[in-house]
Image: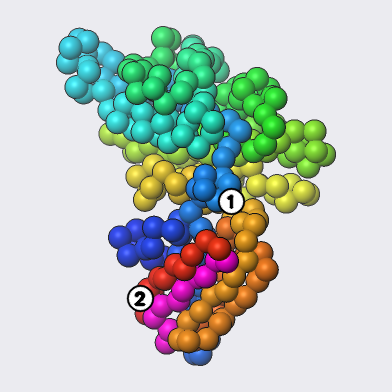
Amino acid sequence: MSSEWVRVNANQKNDFFGEVRHRLISASEREVEVVIKPDKELGFELAMTALALDGSRSMLRTYAAALPPIIRRKQNKMPEIARPLASFLAENSRNQCAIAYWACGDDGSDIEPVGIMGKSDIEAYQFQGAEKWGGGTKLTPIVEYFWEQVFAETDKVGMAVILTDGAWDDDDHTQLLKLTHRICDEVSAGTRQLMKCVILGLETDDNKGELERIRSRFFELDDYEHPSDLDVWYTSWINELEDWIDLFIELVKDWSLGVGGFVESQGQKVQQKDEFNFSIQFNLPANATSFTLHLDDVGDYAQEIMI
């Protein structure tokens, strides 16, 4: 009789948690999953991050690229999206985020690297768009560029975030799946560190007719399976993110937190472990309205749940 998952809203969530959700699994039990928010104090840091900005012609209006410069600065919508995102990525990766435009050139296969930037560089950068706007949307070239060049020498996990307002074509998708398989092969063999690839969809006034096709592509990547069980892809719509930290939630779920403790509800310990992962699952009585996570030598974190 399991019910649908219920997510605790951001304004009702203890700031220590990146995600809290629960559901009834019987008349007497409720299943709960929490994901602890990644933080440098808990040992979370990526080796490198990258941000790829869609440079196809369909983005011209978003960048206000056809307007005179003095007007464009006020109408360009990309800085308010890209600047805080790039800054957040740099903050969590040794102050370095590789920025590039993709889907550039006649057929959308060209890449225009901007460079590796720290937070101060990102704050000064104007995010004006590509030099040569693209006539198509090809995703494989930017993923391959990040994998073969930007992340080639990383010593631990990195993340590449790709913004898009369009769906890539069938041939490109076939090549992308082949590249994904190769990435998984190399990571599972221990010769490379994982490059987590995140695609964020942008809904604009010009792409309403493509939204279903974009969603279909997202589902195919999210459902991609490799014998190693490695998960390279995470997709979302940028307007559905509560916080930039949501980008890291899927990445860290199976990582060890390195500390143990217990979960308590209604005066009883419902789970106890010597070492937790960032993602913690446990069951509560169906009528429980709160729980507290105690982490040894770290602290106690109480959370209410609406039933």
Quadrant location, the C terminus? bottom left
Q: Is residue 229 left or right of residue 68?
A: right
Q: Which residue is mark 1?
A: 252
The secondary element bearing badge 1 is classed as: helix
Which residue does the image show at 34% across and 23% down from the upper left?
123
278 versus 152 height, above or below: below
The type of residue carrying mark 1 is Val
Q: Which residues are magenta?
A: 286-296
Which residue does the image show at 54% across and 33% down from the upper left?
93
Residue placed most toward the observer, 132 or 259:
259
Q: Is residue 119 left or right of residue 49?
A: left
- Where on the picture, by quarter, is residue 64? top left
Residue placed most toward the observer, 236 or 282:
282
- For residue 306, the mark is 2
The secondary element bearing badge 2 is classed as: loop
Which residue does the image show at 62% across and 50% down from the upper left?
223
- For residue 112, the mark is none
The type of residue carrying mark 2 is Met
